[in-house]
Image (cartoon, rainbow, N blue to C red):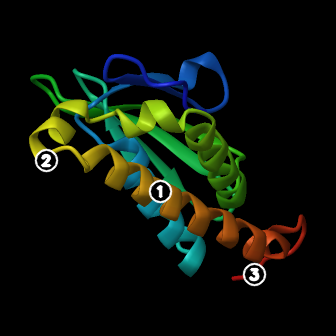
């Protein structure tokens, strides 16, 4: 779903190559997406994550059973293109997010390197601790909500 971030860019791909987007450092993907996923699993409400493609913006709305990926063109005639519906549950999206962030935590810690330099020497340590705390919370919610997403069962 999320590649290893490099040079302020990460690729988000959910489903086929048609739903692959290069997202820039403008959005703090790890921090913002984790916060949204945690809230979504806590409340079982749909949530959205986004990222800037420069130009344009990708929005992924995660509902109980499906994800909807939209590309918003921010050119002279702003419009939404290529709305894609994927059968990826909220739980599966959160599992993939947890895996991808955990697998490349060092790169995600360095995602906003310039900001960390401005914040001082302990910024990297603080950022890593915050990410670990959120990843731990997400993992606990994934475990708690597993049975809510059993096939054929609708919790809502």
For numbered disc 1, what is the local secondary structure?
Answer: helix
The answer to whether residue 89 is visible is yes
User: Which residue is denoted by mark 3 in the rendering?
Assistant: 155
Residue at 74% of width from left, 74% of height from top? 145
Q: Secondary structure at mark 3?
A: loop
Marks 3 and 2, how far apart at CA: 44 Å
**Disc number lying in front (3 or 2):** 2
Position above or below: 83 against 138: above
Quadrant into which the N terminus falls: top right
Q: Position of residue 68 (x, y in %)?
A: 53, 46
Asked whether the beta carbons under mark 1 and mark 2 sit within 8 Å of each other, the answer is no
Task: Tell me the quarter of the picture where residue 94 sits.
Answer: bottom right
Q: Is residue 113 left or right of residue 20?
A: left
Left/right of residue 138 with respect to residue 32 in the rendered view: right
Tag of residue 119: 2
Q: For the point 15% across and 23% down, which residue is it?
A: 75
Helix, strand or loop for disc 2: helix
**Distance of label 1 from label 2 (alpha carbons):** 22 Å
The reply to whether residue 44 is visible in this rendering is no
Find residue 33 and report its horizontal and vertical position in percent: 44, 52
Depth check, front residue: 135 or 46: 135
Quadrant housing the C terminus: bottom right
Mark 3 or mark 1, whichever is nearer to me:
1
- Count neighbours of disc 3 (C-alpha within 10 A) and say few if under 14, some if 14 to 19, many if 20 or more: few
Q: Position of residue 41 (x, y in %)?
A: 59, 71
Give the number of the disc on residue 25.
none
Q: Specify the label residue 34 is tagged with.
A: 1
Answer few, some or many: residues within 10 Å of disc 2's Cα (few below 14, many 20 plus, some between 14 and 19). Answer: few
Which numbered disc flags the more N-terminal residue, 1 or 2? 1
| Disc nearer the start of the sequence (3/1) | 1
Question: Which residue sits at x=34%, y=37%?
Answer: 51
Mark 1 or 2: the one toward you: 2
């Amino acid at each position: 779903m999320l590649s290893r971030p490099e040079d302020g860019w990460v690729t988000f791909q959910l489903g086929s190559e048609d739903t692959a987007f290069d997202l820039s450092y403008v959005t703090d993907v790890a921090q913002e997406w984790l916060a949204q996923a945690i809230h979504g699993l806590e409340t079982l409400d749909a949530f959205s994550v986004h990222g800037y493609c420069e130009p344009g913006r990708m929005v992924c709305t995660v509902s109980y059973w499906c994800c909807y990926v939209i590309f918003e063109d921010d050119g002279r005639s702003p419009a939404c293109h290529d709305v894609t519906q994927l059968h990826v549950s909220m739980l599966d999206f959160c599992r993939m997010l947890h895996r991808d962030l955990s697998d490349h935590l060092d790169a995600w810690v360095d995602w906003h390197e310039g900001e960390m330099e401005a914040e001082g020497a302990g910024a990297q340590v603080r950022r890593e601790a915050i990410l670990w705390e959120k990843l731990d919370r997400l993992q606990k919610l994934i475990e708690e909500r597993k049975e809510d997403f059993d096939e054929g069962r609708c919790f809502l």
